[in-house]
Amino acid sequence: MQPGRVLLLQPSPTVTPAGAGQPSDLSQTVVSWLPISVEPWVGDVFSTIVIIVLAWAVSRLVVQLFGRRIAQFFRRPSLTRTALRGIRVAVYLFAIISIMGVWGLKIGDIGLSVAVFSAVVGVVVAPIVGSFISGIFLLADQPYEIGDMIELADRDQRGFVEDITLRHTKIFTLDNSFLVIPNGTMRDRDVVNYSAEDPRMRLSLDVLVTYESDIGEARTLVERAARQVDNVIGGGPDIRVGAARYPAAPTCYINEYGDHGVLLTLRYWVTEPYKLLAARSKVQTNLADLVEDADVEFAYPHSHLHFDETSGAMELSMAEQRGREMEFPTDGGEPGPSAPQSSDADGE
């Protein structure tokens, strides 16, 4: 028997794509630090957690180190917060790219998926993109700033701007409610800013006094009632609004001579626009106390009807006129019976 040859069958090596099923360098380093042997995917999970924690710590550290310098550079709270948010987003974006490297993913691998996903949800993403663009315009145009008191004209609602982001504007109303309005909607609204440039605001108050009152004394008392309020500007240089200048002290004008009295208009300035109704109420309370012992009387709408011989005759109905003629005949005869004596047909 001749010796034959023995064939040894060995499995052919399989080629695995780079990064698939193989731990990354960072995972291998982390696993090597552990006192026990673990699976490669456990190292990937641990590495992901480490990257997230480091990203959170680095973002906070960067904000603390450069936050004050950024605030001094922009000098606007809204731009400062936007810049700090951009720094945080950049740190977390770098962390996401690092996590993708840990799991063996590349940007090119998900490029097609992102393109398909963007095409599918384009209709949903379009309003969000519009809000981002509107937020950029709001930050550039500066119609209001964080801390300003604004009024939404269409809602007749006032509040303080709490935050301005690229997507929305947060407002705390005076009723202690919270509004979050997309920037796309804010750009289409009529917004009144009470805190822009100069927080001082001018108010007016109409007072109607009788013609019998001392008009000069009435004007003096109205101005004095405004000066006695704490947050009302009592005097000083004229206040400039655009190209015009207005007296800083309370000033009472004769507006018109009306049907029921003389209309006086008080113009006065308050130092802060946050308690307008309270300031107006104090002015009117002081005025009511001052006119008690003065020759001034508030007028009110009233009518006085006067009839005389020139006022004409009052028309009567035919039945009333016939009854008056029977009771008081015009030919000088005796008054006739005012009513039949009997209701019988024979007159009995």
Image (spheres, rainbow, N blue to C red):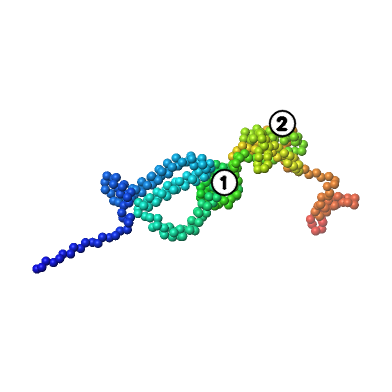
Identify the residue shown where x is 55% and y is 52%.
Answer: 185
Q: Judge whether residue 180 can be spotted in this image.
A: no
- SS at badge 2: loop
Badge 2 density bin: few <14, some 14–19, many ≥20, Cα 10 Å: few
| Relative image position of residue 112 (x, y in whole percent) | 41, 59
Amino acid beneath label 1: Gln
Amino acid beneath label 2: Asp
Identify the residue shown where x is 42% and y is 47%.
Answer: 91
Left or right of 84 on screen, residue 212:
right
Question: In this figure, which residue is indicated by the disc labeled 2?
Answer: 293
Is residue 11 shown above or below 151? below
Of tags 2 and 1, the one toward the viewer is 1
Front residue of this view, candidates 267 and 279: 267
Identify the residue shown where x is 74% and y is 42%.
Answer: 256
Question: In this figure, which residue is indicated by the disc labeled 1?
Answer: 142
| Displayed quadrant of residue 235 | top right
Image quadrant containing the C terminus: bottom right
The residue sitting at the left extreme is 1
Q: CA distance from mark 2 to mark 1?
A: 51 Å
Badge 1 density bin: few <14, some 14–19, many ≥20, Cα 10 Å: few
Front residue of this view, candidates 312 and 195: 195
| Displayed quadrant of residue 343 | bottom right
| Relative image position of residue 45 (x, y in whole percent) | 34, 49
**Is the residue under label 1 in contact with that under label 2 (CB below 8 Å)?**
no
| Relative image position of residue 50 (x, y in whole percent) | 36, 46
Image quadrant containing the N terminus: bottom left
Is residue 159 shown above or below 184? above
